[in-house]
């Protein structure tokens, strides 16, 4: 598939283009997204489990939902 057609698909499925990308990255992300559309995404419970694991195991700390208030 020509590169311009891949970018057309990207624009249909993602809100913005990545700053730097290789053809392999572009193809793998598009393939994942097209499979998700065709077969359905992961169940909500699985997504939540993965997010929880990411929060526990990541060295980068981010908050989901409302940010906790700081004391004082």
Image (cartoon, grey):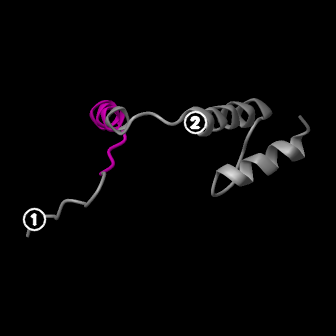
The answer to whether any part of residue 18 appears in the image is no
For the residue pair 43 and 67, the one nearer the viewer reads as 43
Could you tell me which residue is drawn at 73 percent across and 48 percent down?
10
Residue 70 x/y as whole percent: 15, 64
Is residue 49 inside the magenta stretch?
yes
Q: Which residues are magenta?
A: 48-63
Could you tell me which residue is drawn at 30 percent across and 51 percent down?
63
- SS class, disc 1: loop
Is residue 1 inside the magenta stretch?
no
**Label 1, label 2: how many angstroms apart (C-alpha)?**
42 Å
The answer to whether any part of residue 47 appears in the image is yes
- SS class, disc 2: helix
What residue is pinned by disc 1? 71
Could you tell me which residue is drawn at 35 percent across and 34 percent down?
54
Dividing the picture into quadrants, the one containing residue 30 is top right
Image quadrant containing the C terminus: bottom left
For the residue pair 55 and 1, the one nearer the viewer reads as 1
Badge 1 or badge 2: first in the primary sequence:
2
Q: How would you rate the neighbour count of disc 2 (Cα within 10 Å): few for under 14, some for 14-19, many for 20 or more?
A: few
9 up-or-down from 72: above or below: above
Could you tell me which residue is drawn at 68 percent across and 30 percent down?
28
Dividing the picture into quadrants, the one containing residue 1 is top right
Residue 41 x/y as whole percent: 50, 36
What residue is pinned by disc 2? 36
Would you say 67 lies left or right of 15 here?
left
Q: Are marks 1 and 2 in contact (CB under 8 Å)?
A: no
Dividing the picture into quadrants, the one containing residue 6 is top right
Q: Main secondary structure of the magenta part?
A: helix
For the residue pair 16 and 39, the one nearer the viewer reads as 39
Q: How would you rate the neighbour count of disc 1 (Cα within 10 Å): few for under 14, some for 14-19, many for 20 or more?
A: few
The dot on residue 45 is none
């Amino acid at each position: 598939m020509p590169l311009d057609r891949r970018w057309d698909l990207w624009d249909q499925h993602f809100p913005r283009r990545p700053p730097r990308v290789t053809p392999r990255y572009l193809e793998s992300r598009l393939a994942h997204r097209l499979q998700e559309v065709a077969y359905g995404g992961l169940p909500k419970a699985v997504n939540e489990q993965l997010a929880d694991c990411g929060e526990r195991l990541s060295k980068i700390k981010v908050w989901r939902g409302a940010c906790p208030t700081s004391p004082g």
